[in-house]
Amino acid sequence: MKIAVLTSGGDAPGMNAAIRGVVRTALSYGMEAYAVHDGYKGLYEGKIDLMKRNDVGQILNRGGTILGSSRLPEFKQKEVRAKCIENLKALGIDALVTIGGDGTYRGAMDLSAEGMPCIALPGTIDNDIASTEYTIGFFTALETAVDALDKLRDTSFSHKRCTVVEVMGRYCGDLAIYAGIACGAEIVITRDTGFNKEDIFRQVQHAKEIGKRHLVIVVAEHITDVQKLAEEIQANSPYEARASVLGYIQRGGDPCAFDRILASKMGSYAVELIRNGIGGQAIYCKSLEVGHCPINEALGKDNVPSDLYRYLSRLN
Ligand code: F6P
């Protein structure tokens, strides 16, 4: 069999680990693996190369995507997708693994329906793919946001300020709420919490009343202009306020261990599906939920060996 892999949409730390997982697993099964450069745009332009084992060496721990990425609005057009399928079929490619966010998923769904079986891997810092609990890149971006928030907290404390910080996430509030919890933010504002200025002013006032020296507010992108919000907080509360937008720094950096593992596993798993003739599927992971059980039950069970053992030999 011949399979191809591409990364599309906003890059995310761990995409390289996923590419490696796909290529190495495919080769371990005796398949040919092809790289599509620059996402769907490169697919349309026929930028497709055969990959060897060493082409994915030294990338497991690297941020970004060695394949390049792009956004291609024209991919919504059937003729554009037909050309992409033609390019893949001309090389005898049987299936395509796409790594990206919701736009990439829509493309993969259409390609699958039109004759090129695709497996979609969730690669986005936004964590906004409903089927999976975590996307590749989310935890690394979270670490980056947390690191930045910790630094902002230091100066916020020193100057007794109200610090307003915008984090990415497109229309999903996960980065904001996870970072907010991890950093002890006083207020988190996302689509899910709603945005009510009077309520925010009241909460800031309350922080003063209970003796808070300073406070941190985390705001998900696309909610409001954080610069303006900081000015309004300053005008309506006892705190001096400052705003920061974390921006694209959240997309970069070496993937954390969790993202490397998740991406490796998902890449490998995608190839196994293809090998079994399965296409048109999205890979997910579940679940880190917190629950409870009687203590004797907790002690009475043997640890279940990690399912990672079964992937190890395919990734080397
Ligand atoms: O999807 C990842 C993301 O970084 C979002 O958080 C953000 O809204 C968007 O991409 C920015 O996209 P672009 O790279 O096209 O400016």
Image (spheres, grey):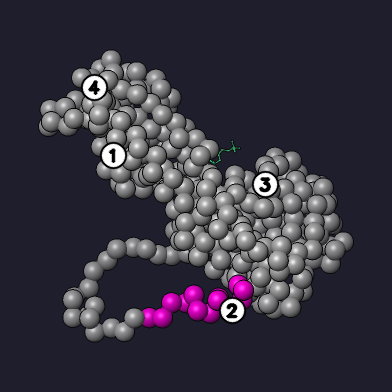
Spatial CA distance of label 3 from label 2 is: 29 Å
Amino acid type of the residue that numbered disc 1 sits on in the rendered structure: Ala
Label 4 to label 2, Cα distance in Å?
57 Å
Instruction: Write down the residue under mark 3.
Output: 69
313 magenta-colored: yes
Q: Report x, y in % for residue 81.
A: 77, 50
| Residue neighbourhood size for the residue with mark 4, other residues' Cα within 10 Å, grouped as few (<14), some (14–19), many (≥20) | many
Location of residue 88 by image quarter: bottom right
Three-letter amino acid code at the position of disc 4: Tyr
Q: Which residues are magenta?
A: 304-316
Closer to the N terminus: mark 1 or mark 3? 3
What residue does disc 1 label? 185
Quickly name the residue at label 4. 239
Assign ligand 1 to one image quadrant.
top right
The kind of residue on which mark 2 rests is Ser
**Whole-percent x, y for residue 248 in the image:** 53, 38
Q: CA distance from mark 4 to mark 1?
A: 16 Å
